[in-house]
Image (cartoon, helix red, strand yellow):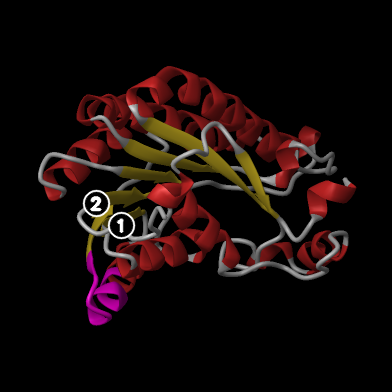
Amino acid sequence: MASLELTGRVALVTGATSGIGAATAALLAQRGARVVVTGRDSARGESVVAAIRARGGRADFVAADLREAHAVRQLARQALDLGGGRVDILVNNAGIYPFAFTEKASETEVDDVYALNMEAPFHLVAELAPGMAERGGGAIVNVSTIAAACEVAGLALYGSSKAAVELMTKAWAAEYGPRGVRVNAVWPGAVRTEGTAGMGEFLDVLAAQAPVGRPGPEEIAEAIAYLASDAASFVQGVLLPVDGGRTAVC
């Protein structure tokens, strides 16, 4: 039976200083991967790395603002250096998700959302997927949202940026899959993290619309770790809902 273990692999997790990203980095390290943690907040990043190391895992932190293309490509190079010339797992988790009605979104906000949510994953895949293909294997997991599929007023900007990521997920599966690189995405539902704290009661309203009826915590990381492992060797180009059943009723 294929294993969930990731011993000997190098993983890069973006947006890993808190929330889903931090939980994913910790779980990948627990399963044996050497993890490159990245985000903008150095203090939080070093805290995530320290916690992983305290549990016997291997991790390094690289500070990066992924709204700039040159910073994205520099991150890819740094991750390769830390990984001894390889990155086997890429988790595109970094994102911003403003809750704002369309007419109130500023030009800067629109640019930032698309730069971080859509363009950063594109550049990272362009930098790292060819190396995975040359080695004959690798896994890319993109973090999307149910807002890309379910109509939610106030989330047009965020949802559309992630809808693009979902199309890229399928296109990358077709592009790199024949060369051994698996590309999939997860669809988190309402998740209570530091980043969603500002949503207040709206988060609970979203969660209540799902059959499970509550926000999700660590389950998202478990799904990502599964898709990154050999246990998912026959899973390619999938958008996996981990949303408490929300997409079943949207």
- Point out residue 185 in the picture as x, y percentages from the top left corner: 55, 41
Q: Residue at x 33, y 45 (%)?
A: 89
- Residue 81 is left or right of residue 130, and the answer is left
Label 2 sits on what residue type? Arg
- Point out residue 151 in the picture as x, y percentages from the top left corner: 84, 39
Which sits in the foreground, 205 or 181?
A: 181
Q: Residue at x 66, y 45 (%)?
A: 145
Badge 2 marks a residue whose secondary structure is: loop
Q: Which mark is residue 9?
A: 2
Q: Which mark is residue 248?
A: none
On the question of residue 60 being in view, the answer is yes
Q: Quarter of the image holding residue 167?
A: top right
Q: Which residue is mark 1?
A: 6
User: Crowding at label 1, few (<14), some or many (≥20) Cα neighbours within 10 Å?
Assistant: many
Badge 1 marks a residue whose secondary structure is: loop
Magenta-colored segment: predominant secondary structure:
helix
Question: What span is in magenta?
Answer: 49-58
